[in-house]
Image: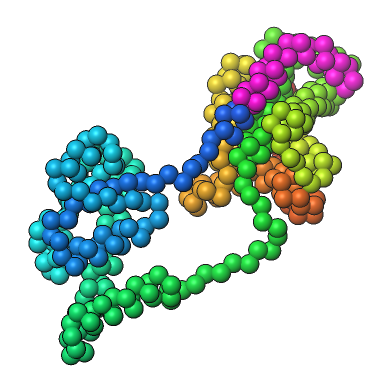
Amino acid sequence: MIAIIKLRIMKLRDDIKLIGLMTAMTLIMIAVFSSINYTDEVTTFGFIDEDQSDLSQMVLDNLNKKEGYEIVLYDLGTAKEAVKNNDVYGAFYLKNGFSSQVMMNNVQVEKLLVTENMANMQMDNLLQTAISQASMDYQVSNMLNQVIRKDAVEVRTYVLDAINEHWTYKKPITVSSTTLTEETTYSSVKHSVVGFSLFFAMFTIIFGISDILMDKEYHTWDRTLVSPISKFSILSGNLVMTFILGFIQVSSMFLISKYLFKVDWTGSMIHLVIIIAAFVFCVTSLGMFLSNFVSSIGQLSAISPVIITGSAMLGGCFWPLEIVTAKPLLLLSNITPQKWAISAIEKVIIQGYGINEVMLSVMVLLGMGIVYLGMGTYLLEKKSA
C-alpha cells in the first residue's frame, strides 16, 4: 500500500491543475452567492376606481393593508401611461357597476399590463382576497342593518369598525412558538462555504479515484495485479490517497474562508474534522463504485457532473433545504451524502452543537460509504476475475 501511495504522490503533479481549478471555483462561487442580498422591495400597483362605491373603497382599503405592496390611485388615462412607463407593475381597473357584480357573485375586473411577470401573477390573488373580504364585510353589515332598525350610517360604521378590529387585532387563531435553542440567523456566506466546498470537492475526489480507470485504459492495471503487491494494497493505496486529497481540499476551504471572507465559525473543530472525514470517505467510495460502470476517463467525465450536480441540488449545496417545500424532493435528498454532511456541519460550526446531536448524520455517511465500498469492491473483483 505504501508503494501505491508513493506512486500516487509522484503522479500528483498531473492532478494539481484539477485541484487548483476546483479550489478556485469554490472561492469564486462562495463570493458570488454570498454577495446576494434580499431586500424588502415594495411592489407598486395602480388602482382605477370608476365605481366610486362603498364596496370599491373597501377593496382599496384591503389592498392597502397588504404588506410589501403600495397601491396608487389613478384615472384611466394616467394609469395607462404609468403602466407603459413601468412606474407601476400593473393596475387594477374597477369599472362602473362593480358593486352590483360583487352582490351577484359575478365579478369581472380588468388588469392593465405591459408584460406578464411574477409580480403581475400576484395581482389575481391579491385582488380576489381583497374583494372576498370586502364582500363579506359589506354583506354582514347589510344583514345587521336589516336586523337592527337603527340609523343605517351609524350601524354600518359601527359594524365595519368592529369587523376591522377583529380582523386586525383579534384573529381567532393565534400561533405561538417556543425556541428550544438559541436563535441563529441564516448566513448566506456560511452556507455557501459549506455547500460549495463539498460540491467542488466531490469532483476532485471522484476524478482522483479515476486513476484506476486510467490504469485499466492503458493496461497497467493487469500488470499491477500480477505484481507482488496484493490487490488489497492496490485498492487501499488508491483510496487512502484520494481520501487525503479530498480531506485536505474540504478542510482548507474552511480555513481560507475564516480569513478571506471573515467567517466566524463556532463549535468544535474536532467534530468538524470527524464529519468531513465521514463525507470524504463516503464520496471516495462512491467514486470507486461509479468507476465500475465506465471504461474510460471520458465516460466518467460525462456522467460525473450530472450525478454530482444533481445530488448537490437535492442535498442543499446551492440553497438551504428549509426553503424547499416539495415533499418528493425532500424525500430524495435523504439519499444524497451532501444533505447529511451539510446538516451536520452547519449544526456544529454555526449552531455550536456537539457530536451527539450529529451522530446520526455521521453514521449515515459512514453507512453509505461502506455500502458503496462493498459494492464497488465486489464489482471490481468480478470484472478482474
Principal SS element in the magenta part?
helix
User: Total of numbered circles in the picture?
Assistant: 0
Specify the segment rendered in magenta: 1-28
Which image quarter holds the N terminus? Answer: top right
Asked whether 141 or 217 is in front, the reply is 141
Query: Residue 253 lies in what quarter of the image?
Result: top right
Is 272 positioned to the left or the right of 120 in the image? Answer: right
Is the residue 175 above or below the residue 353 in the image? below
Is 382 positioned to the left or the right of 113 in the image? Answer: right
- Decide if residue 359 is in sight here: no
Residue drawn at (74%, 33%) of the image: 258
Asked whether 16 falls inside the magenta stretch, the response is yes
Asked whether 270 or 94 is in front, the reply is 94
Residue drawn at (30%, 58%) of the image: 63
Residue 123, image x and y in percent? 29, 50
Is the residue 126 above or below the residue 5 in the image? below
Q: How is the image coloured?
A: rainbow
Is 94 positioned to the left or the right of 173 in the image? Answer: left
Residue drawn at (23%, 79%) of the image: 156
- Decide if residue 12 is in sight here: yes
Which image quarter holds the C terminus? Answer: top right
Asked whether 276 or 336 is in front, the reply is 276
